[in-house]
Amino acid sequence: MASLFGHVAAAAAIGQAAPAERRKDWRFWYMAAMCACLPDADVAGFRFGIRYEDLWGHRGMTHSLVFAAAVGALAAARFKPDWRKEGWKLAALFAAITASHGFLDALTNGGHGVAFFSPFDAARYFFPWTPIQVSPIGAKGFFSAKGLAVIVSELKWIGVPALIAGAALRSSAKP
């Protein structure tokens, strides 16, 4: 998996597509960060005997596009938007932020792949190119030499692209 720092960087970049009014609201950014990190809540399943390969295992259902769409709609609903004007756009934006988690994980060089199409297809996928170093699960493993290698990898493959994409999205977003 990419680290939580990488996932939040992607959320910050994608969030730049929001209208200026939303970008000024700290609650929007909090929700964006939560959407980006939420899929990794599935690691708690290890403690309950849920195996990595199971539907609700790591990189399973919570990394799927169906889950991203549901989270996007729930996150948008929290802001009580006018669904005819802004609601579906906000839901799509939060869904994209949530889905970015799985896309970043599919770019890592470890794990069992991402179940993008769960619950309809249990297959796990990686992209053909996997330049991002997989992050250790847990804080202890992250604060190590391996964790440093992950940070360097993510600065190169997530941080720089996120800055460029964020600037491009912000310049094209509605004021």
Image (tube, grey):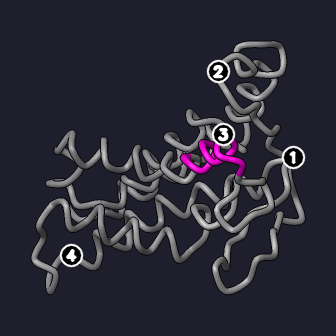
Residue type, numbered disc 4? Gly
The quarter in which the C terminus is drawn is bottom left
Query: In the depicted view, which residue is nearer to us: 69 or 155?
Result: 69
Q: Main secondary structure of the magenta part?
A: helix
Report which residue position mark 2 lands on. Answer: 139
Report which residue position mark 1 lands on. Answer: 110
In terms of secondary structure, where does tag 3 sit? helix
**Measured Cα–Cα span from mark 2 to mark 1:** 18 Å
Where's residue 151, x and y in %?
71, 26
Report which residue position mark 4 lands on. Answer: 87
**Measured Cα–Cα span from mark 2 to mark 4:** 36 Å
Report which residue position mark 3 lands on. Answer: 47
Asked if the stretch drawn in magenta spans residue 78, the answer is no
In terms of secondary structure, where does tag 2 sit? helix
Query: In the depicted view, which residue is nearer to us: 80 or 62?
Result: 62
Contact, mark 2 vs mark 4 (Cβ under 8 Å): no
